[in-house]
Every structure is written in structure tokens, then in C-alpha cells.
Image (spheres, rainbow, N blue to C red):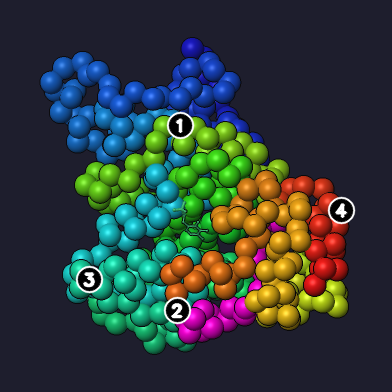
Amino acid sequence: MLRRKLPANIKSATKALHVDHAIEDGAAVSPPIHQSVTYRTDSPEDFSQKAQEPFNDVFYARHGTPTSSRIAKILADLEGAEEAMMFASGMGAITTTILALVQQGDHVIAQKSLYSASASFLTKFLPRFGVDITLVDQQSIEEFEKAIISKTKIILVETPVNPLMRLTDLRSVSKLAKIHNIITICDNTFATPINQTPIKLGIDLVVHSASKYIGGHHDLLAGCVVGSTELLRRIWDTSMDLGPTAAPFNSWLALRGIRTLKLRVMEHNANALKVASYLEQHPKIGDVFYPGLTSHPQFKLANQQMSGFGGMLSFDIPGGYQAGSKFLKALNICLNAASLGGVDTLVVQPAVMFRARLTDQEITELNITPGMIRMSVGIEDLCDILNDIEIALSKI
Ligand SMILES: *Cc1c(COP(=O)(O)O)cnc(C)c1O
């Protein structure tokens, strides 16, 4: 089969369609799903070599599969890194990455506002194994600096992040970490590599929940980590013991989803900016939190490190918990459902969502007001989203 030669300077939208075809010589335009869990070897010597070789995707499926390698190749390329690895979920990627890099006695710094399961893993799980955690205000580089001790191994950041869509200055954090030989990890789920590429700003590792924008259609659970071959080898070793490997079909769905990532993200960006601007001038709405609004306290930073502002926003309905619930119940296009980053607009009331994991006091400390609504703006026609919101607001 004739191999194609891709030009060196192709852009994101083209990469997502073509770079994985370099992996395999198959002529199929839509890639096959490699469902086989095991692969025949040529000899005991070949068996032994494949069993030990990192990232070998044609030995046993816990080690990787050709389908996962294809989506990983695209993610590495889009993020501007050497290597990527797929996982069964975003949390599988985050926990395996951190567990691969710390040992008893080590210290991890993270921002106070984090995806709730990441926060719970850091503050409730890791301390059981002798790893200490310090949480800091993501907006203060001084707090990051003050938190560093000789045992600090990792700084974990996430930007933009729930619930106020606050940002972390990726250039400053990575610069600080490099001075102290600390590994930086950025959860880039909300931004996607279309809007933000942390590795190009000096961050060591990027993690994603591929269940969100990368898959994009609310039909798969997967995660990934992207970074240098050296760090990914350590993470791969740990994943051999823990087993959070991505299933071939879910990797295939992520591959199917990422083909249209650019197109979808551009539409999410455009719709969200218009929804945020509409909400900001609405008399029944209090604060609106979106990095693309000039009223966002970090609008300047958003412009420095993001090329688009994403599809996630939140806003406060002054009537409190009751008004927020009433609003959600009156919506007909926007769906009240967990998760984010897909083609359908999803809304949640963070005060309700976070109650599963946090106390009322912890919820207040995260600046979550009872009437706050978080919206993952989808790709429906903008008029229909705005109409749905307008009608629902008229009922409160
Ligand atoms: C959803 C999410 C995760 C966890 O991913 P799963 O695929 O649900 O395990 C981690 N970080 C962020 C920012 C998320 O939105």
C-alpha cells in the first residue's frame, strides 16, 4: 500500500483528519476498530520483546490498541507534544498520571478550584498514602511560589475552571515550576487544543476528559494524557499495574469525534460569546462569568493564552436556589444534565451538583451561589438557545 506523505505545515483541522493515517498502511478512509484483546507473535523472542516494549499496541490490549494509538497520535500532534496515551476516563488519566509521578513523602500543589473528582483524589485519597497537598488561589502566582517546598513534585492546574471560569496563568506557573524542577500538569478539558495549547506555554503534561469536547457527542467515556516520551513512559508503566486502559470502541468514538473538533469548537466559541453577552445585559441576571467578556477579571490573560474562549459559562440568578431551579425546569432546548462539551446545550445548578461531594460550607468557599447556573453551550442555532433562555427567564 502506498504511504501518503503529509506536508509538514498542516493546520489543526487537517491534522485531526489525517495524521493518524500515517500509523497504519490500511487503505480504509474511516479507520477500523481493533477489538482483538491479544495479538499473535512470530516467535518467543518476538513475544518477549513486545511484552516489554512501552506503548506496544499489538500485544495485549491493556498495553494499548491500534485504535487508541490513532487518536493518541492526533492528540499529541494537536497539543504539540511527543506522545499521548488514551485512558478509560478523564479520571483514569489524571489519577494514573499523578500516581506515576509521586511517592510517599512527596508534596503536590494544586489550585483550590478544580474538577471535583480531581480535588477529592488529591485531598482525600493521596494523603492516605503519605502524599501532602497544598491548595492555592489559582490567580496568585505568589501563592503558588509560597507553597513550594523541597518535596514538591507536581503542580496541577486547570484553566478555565468551574464555577467562575477563572484562569490560571500557564506561562508564569510553568516558569516557576521549571526553576524548582517541578512537573506541571494542566487539565485542558474546557479549552481543548483548539483554544489553548499549554505545552507550548511550558507546561509538561496535558490531561483531558475526552468524554467532553474531544468526543463531543455525549456518547463515550475516555481520557488522555499528552507530553514527553520520557514522562509518558513512566505513566505507561503505572497504567500497566492499574489497568485504566481505554476500550477500543471508545477510542474509536473519540477518533470519530475529534475529526470535527475544530468545526465544533469554533461554533461553541461563537455561540457561547453571544449567549454570555446576551445574559450580561439581561435585567434578571446578576454576574456572568465567561473569559471572553471584557468584564471577566482576567480578560487580558484570556487573550494572552487562549485563541478562543470556549463553550463554558456560568451566571447568577439573583432569586437564589428556588429561582435557579425554576429556570432549569422551564427550559425546553437546554437540557439539565451532568457533563459538558458536547453538541447539545447542557445546564446544571452547581449548588446541586457539588452537593454530592462537598459540604454547604465548602460550596460557599468555592464562590458558588445558590442561584448559579452553569451552561455548556451547544451547537444548536443561536436563536433557539437564546429563545429558550428568554422564555425560561420570563417565568421567574
Ligand atoms: C469531566 C471532567 C473530568 C473527568 O473526566 P471523566 O471522563 O468524567 O472521568 C476531569 N476534568 C474535567 C475538567 C472534566 O470536565
Q: Nearer the viewer, mark 1 or mark 2?
A: 2
Q: Amino acid at mark 3?
A: Arg
In the rendered image, is residue 108 in sight? no
Does residue 38 show up magenta in the picture? no
Say if mark 1 contacts mark 2, CB within 8 Å: no
Q: Can you identify the residue that label 2 sits on?
A: 359
Q: Can you identify the residue that label 1 sits on?
A: 249
Q: Can you identify the residue that label 4 sits on?
A: 383
Q: Amino acid at mark 1?
A: Phe
- Pick whichever of labels 3 and 4 is earlier in the sequence: 3
Question: Residue 378 appears at what percent x and percent y?
Answer: 71, 51
Residue at mark 4 to residue at mark 2: CA–CA distance:
38 Å
Q: Which residue sits at x=41%, y=65%?
A: 118
Q: Vertically, is 235 above or below 316?
A: above
Residue at mark 1 to residue at mark 2: CA–CA distance:
37 Å
In the image, the segment drawn in magenta is 360-377
- Pick whichever of labels 4 and 2 is earlier in the sequence: 2
Q: Counting other residues with Cα less than 10 Å from the Cα at mark 4, is it few (<14), some (14-19), or many (20 or more)? A: few
